[in-house]
Image (cartoon, helix red, strand yellow):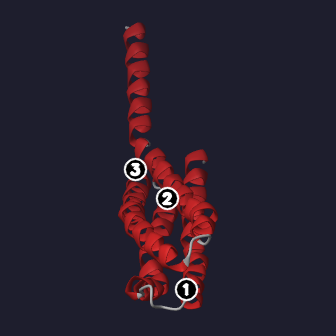
Amino acid sequence: MARTIVLRQHRSQHLAQRSSEARMISGQLALVVSAVFAGAALYINIVEQPARLQLATPDLLTEWKLAYKRGTLMQAPLAVLGLLLGGVAWWQTGRPEWMVGGALMIVNWPFTFLVIMPVNHKLMAADSATTDVDVRKMIEHWNRLHAGRTALGCAATAAFLWASLS
């Protein structure tokens, strides 16, 4: 009888631990998603941007337009996914750090629409006839603005890491 009770308690504890571990997959995925987002954003700022600035202005503009379209297809869904996974982890654990990380991920959307999008529209409308100085200055300005997205991604990653270590 005592052995049966001990076995039931052990099984109950084991199932609770497995359930807790399974639920925290959402938190770990949120951490991975935010790290991918932050890494991609940082790569753009410190690798891609300096390399593209070495191009002649018509090629610089063409490359920026192509990279911008592809980057949007990758980073926009990552921001939404980070919010959703952070929200699920918060719901499962009640730890507010998960929601903070998710909020930092989704803040990239309004930041992009309100702060970066006006520059994006000017660059997308620009053509080779635009003076070299104008295009270069706009793309350099765009990179400084994009650093804000990098900072938000890094902050979200730090929040998710903090939540996962707590």
Taking depth in this image into account, of 105 and 128 the one nearest to the observer is 128
Does 75 sit above or below residue 60?
above
Q: Quadrant of the N terminus?
A: top left
Q: Nearer the viewer, mark 3 or mark 2?
A: 2
In the rendered view, does 139 fall on the left or right side of 13?
right
Which class describes the residues within 10 Å of circle 2: few (<14), some (14-19), or many (20+)?
A: many
Q: Nearer the viewer, mark 1 or mark 3?
A: 1
Q: Nearer the viewer, mark 2 or mark 1?
A: 1
Residue 107 in view (yes/no)? no
* SS for callout 1: helix
Callout 1–callout 3 Cβ contact below 8 Å? no
Residue 95 on image: x %, y %? 50, 56
Whole-number angstrom distance, CA of label 2 to CA of label 1: 23 Å
Which one is earlier in the sequence, the residue at label 3 or at label 2?
A: 2
Disc 1 marks which residue? 138
Residue drawn at 55 percent across, 74 percent down: 146
- The residue type indicated by label 3 comes to Gln
Does 129 sit above or below residue 74?
below
Disc 2 marks which residue? 37
Which one is earlier in the sequence, the residue at label 2 or at label 1?
A: 2
Does 130 sit above or below residue 24?
below
Residue drawn at 47 percent across, 65 percent down: 105
